[in-house]
Image (tube, helix red, strand yellow):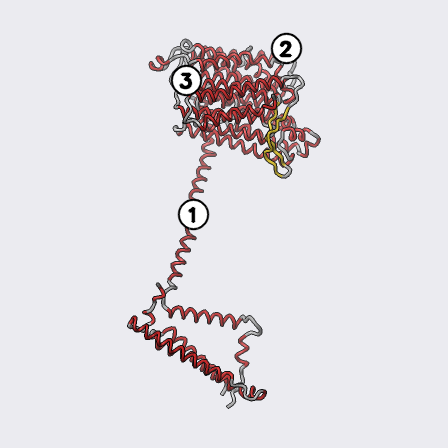
Amino acid sequence: MPINYYIFLSVALFCIGVAGVLTRRNAIIIFMCIELMLNSVNLLLVAFSKMHWHAMAATNPGAGANAQLFVFFIMIVAAAEVSVGLAIIVMMYRNTHSIDVNFLNRLKH
Amino acid sequence: MVNLVWLIPVLPLAGFLLTGLFRNYLSKGLTGVIGCGTVLAAFVLSVLIFGEVRQPDFMPVIVNLFDFISVGTLHIAFSFQVDQLSVLFLLIITGVGFLIHLYSTSYMHEEAAPHFARYFSYLNLFVFSMLLLVLGSNFVILFIGWEGVGLCSYLLIGYWFKNMDYDAAAIKAFVMNRIGDLGFLIAIFMMISKFGSVDFETVFGAAAGGAHGGASVGYLTAITMLLFVGATGKSAQIPLYTWLPDAMAGPTPVSALIHAATMVTAGIYMIARSHVLYDLTPVTQHVVAVIGLATALLAASIALKQNDIKKVLAYSTVSQLGYMFLGLGVGAYAGAVFHVMTHAFFKALLFLGAGSVIHAMGGEQDMRKMGGLAARLPVTRWTMWVGCVAIAGIPPFSGFFSKDEILSAAYAVSPVYYVVGVFTALLTAFYMFRLYAETFMGGFRGTHEQEHHLHESPAAMTAPLIILALLAIVGGFVGIPDAIKPDAHLLGKFLEPVVGASPKGEGGGIEWVLMGVSVAVALIGAFWAAARFSRRPELGEATGFGKVLANKWYVDEFYNAVIVRPLDLLAQFLVFFDKNIVDGIVNGVGSLVRYGSRQLRLLQSGQVGGYVLLMVLGILVLFLVELFHPGGTSSAPAIVPSLGGKLPH
């Protein structure tokens, strides 16, 4: 399949994620959109890795999997970030009984 | 002794400081002693220095005090020049000045002590400035004194500052002086530019030398004309003379000292001092003579119809100053200075006498309410009679000799000058004896209380009158013309090293005719006026042509309409401009900043979502910029299509 399809899909997913972060009010939905952005990047990395696999393996056997390994790093970071973020959301709810981000404008003061 | 000349101005300066700074603590008696004492001491010193200068082999001395301005190649020293001209003026200033100070102690005795001291501090400051003016050895020191006397004139005219009219008169005097000073300053700048110095010796030497030191005759004409503009302002000639009659708002001794004997003669001193330049520029000389003559005639005509005794004397001063400028314009520099001296005597006498009359009348200055004062004020009456005879130019009193010298020199240049001058002399005699007749002769026309109050003035006032009268009688004998007695013109010979030789008269016969005509004219004017006005004094308002004269030829109204009103409108426009436009812009910037900051503050909403949006937008902009104007190598739109590779399955 032409690489363009993968690029377009990844970009579309990323943009949907950005739009979601900017416009949604529910904090958990915002987290889901952040995950969406990260995973779109993962998709793109894997696609490019596959594209260049045979070209790179010809010169150096065992090479070409760099990007796929990087994807694992991204997933780990995403998992850690989600755990911390959800903890914050729980504390938020405990204090204000709401997870509406528009309600939380304490930075203004 | 000559080296002590610096002491002469310093003494009145000390008097100024003492009476000025301690005016709240000094008694009137002590103030009078300090004020008069400093000027008397200066007079004594002047006499001693005069004794030295009189020696036949005296050379002008320059006493250097300190370096005043030293910039690049321009060096202006604060130094005094002692020569015949300056020592003559020293004697006049300190001598007549002392008499007027003495007179003032009695005339101003009704003032409260601090104001009395203020008066004397101003007077002493004036004497100091005038002495600086005549002693300076370069134009800059002269100018310092020039400005100083202008300032003191303002201070003293506006001495009774609570009266707004007097304040206006003081401002008028100062502003008109200033206009003249502009001309003077430009002349100084031109001198520095061409001759590189303002010292009298350097400038006159360069101008007199070959090629006039690099200046063309046109350039010198410009300098001398501008100096003359300064003189018209200071010495009240056309067109800057209207301040002097208004200056009568000041106390009468001030009018005597400043506006008769000394300050107004500063212009004549300056031109006499610069005679070298004027001799080289006949155009300016003609201008000086014509303006002097015109002023003399104009002022004499106005004096004919004035009813305030001081105003008559004021216009008389303007007229006599015109004579002095006529003398300068025809080259009779010694004659003009001679007239300065005699005029100082009889005009100060006349003003002080008028002050005595006003004092006796309890403040009344309108001659129509006087009359018949001869019996009650004998000393004043006789001294003023002497003054009137002297100013009319009737021999053997002093005015005859000085006026005749100017007139015969004028005849030598142009008979027209002589004829106009003689006509003005007729007018002079006429209005002076009109003054005398309306004041002292006839019946008393004042009120009963005034009549009770009439008394001769105290000794402090009559003594100066007597001394000045004696001087007015004998003062002319230092300038006997050659036609009467050859080689007897002591003053001319005394001043010759400084102002050059006096022009030779026409010679025997014509001179006698000229003298005879002017004397006859003066006698006719005097007797006619005395006879007419002692019997029928002018009591009503003037009519017809007389009204034009009484209203001073409407010159003040003309100046108001042509100069003052437009300037006023300009000032109003500028006020509007400054308040609304300039301030508007400045305030506008301020309110713009406040509006902008108010709008920017809305960014800080506290909404994290908004912040993230701005972040994303910023990154987008950066990417776009990088895409189309990359920092590195090739341009971007080519990158994406180049990845046209296919993915293997």
Amino acid at the residue labelled 2 = Lys
Image spot of residue B305 (x, y percent): 45, 20
User: Residue B281 falls in which quadrant of the image?
Assistant: top right
Amino acid at the residue labelled 3 = Ile
Mark 3–mark 1 distance (CA, rounded to whole Å): 53 Å
The quarter of the image holding the N terminus of chain B is: top right
Q: Which residue is mark 2?
A: B485
Amino acid at the residue labelled 1 = Asp
Do callouts 3 and 2 point to residues on the same chain?
yes
Q: Residue at the location (53% across, 76% down)? A: B637
| Residue B358's disc number | 3
Q: Which residue is mark 1?
A: B583
User: Residue B508 falls in which quadrant of the image?
Assistant: top right
Do callouts 3 and 1 point to residues on the same chain?
yes
Q: Sequence-wise, which precedes: disc 1 or disc 2?
A: 2
Image spot of residue B489 (x, y percent): 62, 14
Depth check: B437 or B231 in front? B231
Do callouts 1 and 2 point to residues on the same chain?
yes
Give the answer, above or below, for where B218 lies relative to B46: below
Q: Chain of mark 3?
A: B
Q: Residue at the location (38% across, 76% down)? A: A84
Closer to us: mark 3 or mark 2? 3
Is residue B289 shown left or right of residue B176?
Answer: right
Give the answer, above or below, for where A60 lies relative to A93: below
